[in-house]
Image (cartoon, coloured by chain):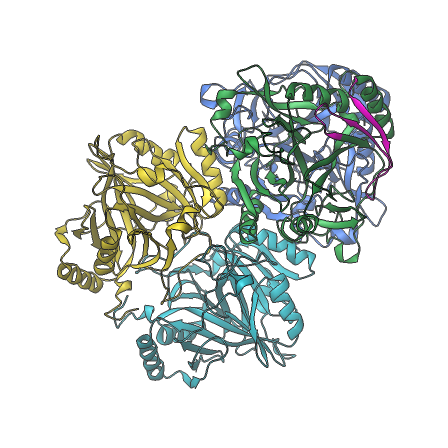
Chain colours: A green, B blue, C yellow, D cyan
Amino acid sequence: MSDPTNPSFDVAHLGHVELYTDRFDESLDFFTRIYGLKLSGTDGQSAYLSAWDDYEFHTLKLTRHHSTGVGHVAYRVSSPEALERRIDAISASGFKTLGWVDGDLGHGRAYRFEDPFGHVFEIYWETRRYEPDEADRPALKNLASRYHGQGCAPRRLDHLNLLAADVREFRRFMETCLGSRVTEMIQLDNGRIGGAWFTVNNKGYDLACTEEHGRGHGRFHHVTYATDTREDILRAADIFLENGVHIETGPHKHAIQGTFFLYVYEPAGNRVELANAGARLILAPDWEPIVWTETERKKGQAWGLKTIETFHTYGTPPVPKGGS
Amino acid sequence: MSDPTNPSFDVAHLGHVELYTDRFDESLDFFTRIYGLKLSGTDGQSAYLSAWDDYEFHTLKLTRHHSTGVGHVAYRVSSPEALERRIDAISASGFKTLGWVDGDLGHGRAYRFEDPFGHVFEIYWETRRYEPDEADRPALKNLASRYHGQGCAPRRLDHLNLLAADVREFRRFMETCLGSRVTEMIQLDNGRIGGAWFTVNNKGYDLACTEEHGRGHGRFHHVTYATDTREDILRAADIFLENGVHIETGPHKHAIQGTFFLYVYEPAGNRVELANAGARLILAPDWEPIVWTETERKKGQAWGLKTIETFHTYGTPPVPKGGS
Amino acid sequence: MSDPTNPSFDVAHLGHVELYTDRFDESLDFFTRIYGLKLSGTDGQSAYLSAWDDYEFHTLKLTRHHSTGVGHVAYRVSSPEALERRIDAISASGFKTLGWVDGDLGHGRAYRFEDPFGHVFEIYWETRRYEPDEADRPALKNLASRYHGQGCAPRRLDHLNLLAADVREFRRFMETCLGSRVTEMIQLDNGRIGGAWFTVNNKGYDLACTEEHGRGHGRFHHVTYATDTREDILRAADIFLENGVHIETGPHKHAIQGTFFLYVYEPAGNRVELANAGARLILAPDWEPIVWTETERKKGQAWGLKTIETFHTYGTPPVPKGGS
Amino acid sequence: MSDPTNPSFDVAHLGHVELYTDRFDESLDFFTRIYGLKLSGTDGQSAYLSAWDDYEFHTLKLTRHHSTGVGHVAYRVSSPEALERRIDAISASGFKTLGWVDGDLGHGRAYRFEDPFGHVFEIYWETRRYEPDEADRPALKNLASRYHGQGCAPRRLDHLNLLAADVREFRRFMETCLGSRVTEMIQLDNGRIGGAWFTVNNKGYDLACTEEHGRGHGRFHHVTYATDTREDILRAADIFLENGVHIETGPHKHAIQGTFFLYVYEPAGNRVELANAGARLILAPDWEPIVWTETERKKGQAWGLKTIETFHTYGTPPVPKGGS
């Protein structure tokens, strides 16, 4: 896959997601005490959070804002040379470029660009590894930090989901700019693509894009961390229940990607997922996208659960009145 | 990672392992009925087996032989061009080359070469996908075949472990020929490397090599399939128990790589593992090998289980009398 | 609890359930190959089935019939003297008695009686233990038979659920005739009892009764076997999915009793459940029934799943046209 | 079982265990923060602890002492009348009686007696239910308190294990005084009983007694809380590992009783277990004790793990020098 025509491996992995919240303190309490991320640091407007086995300083940047939704999405590249190649490809693509930013507490300079639907992306090479202090040092040296067992305690960042008015065009953006590939997708009867699941590596997906059904722009559907087991997710359901967190749907298994899932809303209203993919990986270098028809999608989730209506309509930030 | 100096992604994944057995019928019964692989096909000397979500025709080739151990180890490359690049690198390496073979029921032509310790490797591009028939068609189209639930029913091939008299030299072989990288290793007090864990992709490892303590040559330690959950492995322990399969050690968790494991001997004596890595992946493109000292290794497994003595001494084929 | 006024322990446990099927061969195939019970024996009209750790010859009697639903419900008493005491109490109760029957392949003579809603009950002391043959002998002698791993492979009979037009009166029947106690119940706003969960021992419930909303009489809601783990139930969902079994609802967790559940229909249409209660037991001898209000019940299941409509309406046998 | 000759059900369940510690603060920190019990209250010398679904005020009484081991063992009876019957039986038994004590923070007056090996028992009827305050109120009203998710967070008290020089005599004590029955036992080749597992209800065991191999008197082997799942125990192993708690053995499955187990030492040295029995219950009123021979016992645990030597020798308090 290192051919110039198939530059997938220039981009190593999803690095972090910036989430906006208009209830910063409550959101931070949710993400640390209940959801179980660690607070790596803070600056003026943001808290930097990571799961206990995320190797970087942060994988979630939680930022005070007048509303909710996603600030930016960051991917780490696989080398300085790969960064150059990607910038060349992005510059040549015709998609909107925003140029360099200095980085923040968690990484060095990053190159920003934007999809046609208002989501800001960045790619970066220079990162800051999470350095555990004494209290945080794991018993086993191959972990990024100790398993703290606080809250749901997922292991690492897994993926995010964005909304776009034209998934086909979003796909072109992902393939062109990030060398990402589609592993599964929904082909609607009207010829449109209902959703597409992308990956830059062996994970089944690190980003999903589903069709925006409101009049929203640049909206966010959810961000997801991975747990080691499905049992972690069943346990998380009890933790959410006991803490009064709104459970939207799950635990259940997605037909698409086969992920065991649980969706909740954090206090500011952003949708957050916990997921477990089992041992599934996309190992085939010539994997052909799985195409689900509208009829197949209507069967619901893997074990027959009807997809909850809000899953098709709810995103952040909310759409202004009369907008959806 | 697509730089010429870091050609890792030329090789996509471990493809299959050929295992020798001098009790073919019993081994085949074990691997299908108890361990839970599917029989994809047979030819004169071999049975071709795969797990229910392996995308290729086979990941285990079980071959009648006068003894036990490994026949060959195969990796699939990521493109026809990558195959050429790898052959160039192997040819230039000075390691022994064996040239092209025609392939078998499961894949097209393959290029063979050998490590200095007598293990035969091959790389190939042209493969045969597993094509489920009606009875084997999965309910969800993103699976390679239906979840049959027979025996332990692991999901996919995970890794194998070879024995070598000089792990350092074996490492040079893996890096040079396959562009594989070391994710974890054991540094012995005597300066030798006690073991090394290699990967060509985002898995923690697809091949491990540990030091040969007998006088064996080209010996095999174990082959492993991955399960979706740890519970699958606890359940497998009961299945092995009820079927009179020798459980060598486990279920427990390795300190190295953090894998939840269970080791048994198949009827001919080859060691076979079931393993679950949870959500662990090696995502960092600049991952530095974790180096375990001899002292650390002596602490045993993750939760304190002392490593069973046979784990250090037993491999296949057996070493001739006076040899160990 | 051995006081004459509180004779609970005269009845030891739910013994077996007789289920009617008008698709005998398909039902038998479902219960053995997919659901994972063992066939202990057959006579002219019935198959006798048990789970791998049921100690008796059978816990499910599957009987050819012109329709579906429950044939009879059997409880085993704790001693011959307890049997006498229970018969005295039943005779004095005014509930309908049917007298002695000879028993069948699985147990000796039994005393039959009937609830006001047409369900036949029996109590018995003399039983036939399941005697494993060589192929069925467990590796561990404290199990009733070997863990066979076939299909869903639940461990033991757990409970059943009946429909009755007047749950309050059904409760009087259970308390009077079986010395059963209510552990949880639903108090409707209209003063009626929506459902009650009964036990004769430390299990949270061995029989539930919910209100009949159709015009059915003597109808059956479901029968349930217990699995050792919740993971067994997640795995069962995949087995049902792959075998085309209709999954009605689940996996999820009931608010009432906290049971992790999965409901399917066997081929003749009877509802069948798999359930796991975790470590929950009713140990308090003075346990007060938990009373759920109608408002609380409307919140749905434990993690927010709305109770599926068929759960309130569907039972077997089907109600004749115009009847529901 | 309510016959005078088989008075089992007079005693309802194991109520609580008093544990001595000479490192009170460290032990209390262990039991609350790491093991995951709740602190219900304290008095001068003791802390009263319970698991999140224990219905009584406490199930563990942790008492400051000059040494370690067990203070007393308490069973709750099933009615005031049952209490009288049991006292009559104990008084008539010839075993040592200690008479009434006033009770403590967790229950009313209790009647004490002693086994021939120095362990103090008590039985009581009047208890104090755990009353959750606002912060502790469960989302589901059928739980004793909210699932807090702190530390290992077991669900309820399960059993304890005592050491006795003559297990046969200890059995006579348990049967006579508590109406307890043996569900499994070890018959040694020398005619002695190596161990016996007792229950007063449907649990497989609530108390085990194994042979004292040191010269100890009144010694304690371990106390155990039950988790809902085996996964809870695997997770607990990581929590113990990260907190520097000594893991003695496990996770693994006992052959006897089939319990999935994990043993650690709390800071003062008392052995503590977490266990899961799956769906296993002793439902048969005429259950015959399973008798394991010495040969069978030597096979080790269910999946072949050799029983760790300390398991046969280590108890608390420690035996004075020269004593073992």
**Is residue C183 on the magenta stretch?**
no
Give the percent coordinates (x, y) of residue A159: 67, 35
**Residues in magenta, as a range:** A94-120
Query: Quick check: B132 left or right of D85?
Result: right
> Along the line of sight, which residue is nearer the eye, D162 or C305?
C305
> Along the line of sight, which residue is nearer the eye, A102 or A51?
A102
Query: Quick check: B85 left or right of B299?
Result: right
Residue B305 can be seen in this image: no
* Vertical comparison of D295 with A85: above or below: below
* Vertical comparison of B61 with D217: above or below: above
Query: Quick check: C230 left or right of B82?
Result: left
Give the percent coordinates (x, y) of residue A21: 69, 43
**Is residue A119 on the magenta stretch?**
yes
At 79% from the left and 57% from the top, the residue drawn is A134
Outermost residue toward the front in this view: A322
Give the percent coordinates (x, y) of residue A174: 72, 23
At 33% from the left and 68% from the top, the residue drawn is D9
> Along the line of sight, which residue is nearer the eye, D152 or B182?
D152
Give the percent coordinates (x, y) of residue A120: 75, 30
